[in-house]
Amino acid sequence: LLLVHFKFSAPFSSVSSLSLPPPSLLNSNMPHSFGTRARTRDMFSKKFRKHGPIKLSQYLMNVKVGDYVDIFADPSVHKGMPYKHYHGRTGIVFNLTKTSVGVRVNKPVNGRIIEKRIHVRIEHIRKSKCQSEILSRKVSNEAAKAEAAKTGVKVNLKRTPKMPKEGYLLFPGGEGAELTTIQPLPFSDLL
């Protein structure tokens, strides 16, 4: 906060003297950083007990065009690292090179969604599990359809929400136990 005091010798006169705050107050603001890795102290740090060399299976990962992948930056590999906005995003592979993977990612910008195409090294890529439930459902539905065609029984392949539990009668203390009815005491004025 910069405070400036003006001293006037007479009303509507020119400024006679200008007093400034001490230099310690003038230089109290910290410099602002807007670098490409700004505010990534936790984001680009290895997780607990996950330090050490990268596994060979990461480099031998089988990735094809059209696969869903998660972009998850490995902080120990600085080459081919994605920008911090794409960390944790899911995209679709559109290109493969010798060491990297081209990924299409949706990015919201001012109320609209832009499809961005970025190339990221294979160390910063994980196979996405977002399609696993859909693919397993597809396999089970095809098996159910084939079974229905054989038997001629109509089958419902739609997903249904979890229904409420069915009601049941609860016997307190087991069957044959005595029930005690408790009622509140009538109001009595203690005065």
Image (cartoon, rainbow, N blue to C red):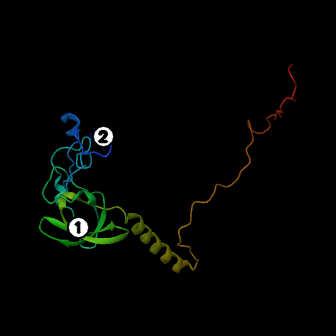
Query: What is the C-alpha distance between the residues marked 1 and 2?
Result: 81 Å
State which quadrant residue 4 falls in: top left
Q: Residue 100: horizontal and vertical position, in percent?
A: 16, 65
Residue at the image position 14 percent from the left and 70 percent from the top? 97
Q: Nearer the viewer, residue 24 or 104?
A: 24
State left or right for residue 157 relative to residue 80. Answer: right
Element at label 1 = loop
Disc 2 target residue = 10
Residue at the image position 28 percent from the left and 38 percent from the top? 9
In what quadrant of the picture does the C terminus appear?
Answer: top right
N-terminal label among 1 and 2 = 2
Residue at the image position 57 percent from the left and 80 percent from the top? 152
Q: Nearer the viewer, residue 7 or 130?
A: 7
Q: Nearer the viewer, residue 10 or 160?
A: 10
Q: Is residue 5 above or below residue 67?
A: above
State left or right for residue 121 relative to residue 10. Answer: left
Residue at the image position 58 percent from the left and 77 percent from the top? 154
Identified by mark 2, the residue type is Ala
Q: Is residue 71 visible?
A: no
Q: Residue 24: horizontal and vertical position, in percent?
A: 20, 34
Disc 1 target residue = 63
Q: Nearer the viewer, residue 1 or 59?
A: 1
Identified by mark 1, the residue type is Val
Q: Residue 137: horizontal and vertical position, in percent?
A: 44, 68
Q: Residue 6: horizontal and vertical position, in percent?
A: 27, 40
Q: Is residue 55 above or below residue 90?
A: above
State left or right for residue 168 relative to residue 160. Answer: right
State left or right for residue 163 relative to residue 42. Answer: right
Q: Is residue 88 visible?
A: yes
Circle on res. 36: none
In what quadrant of the picture does the N terminus appear?
Answer: top left
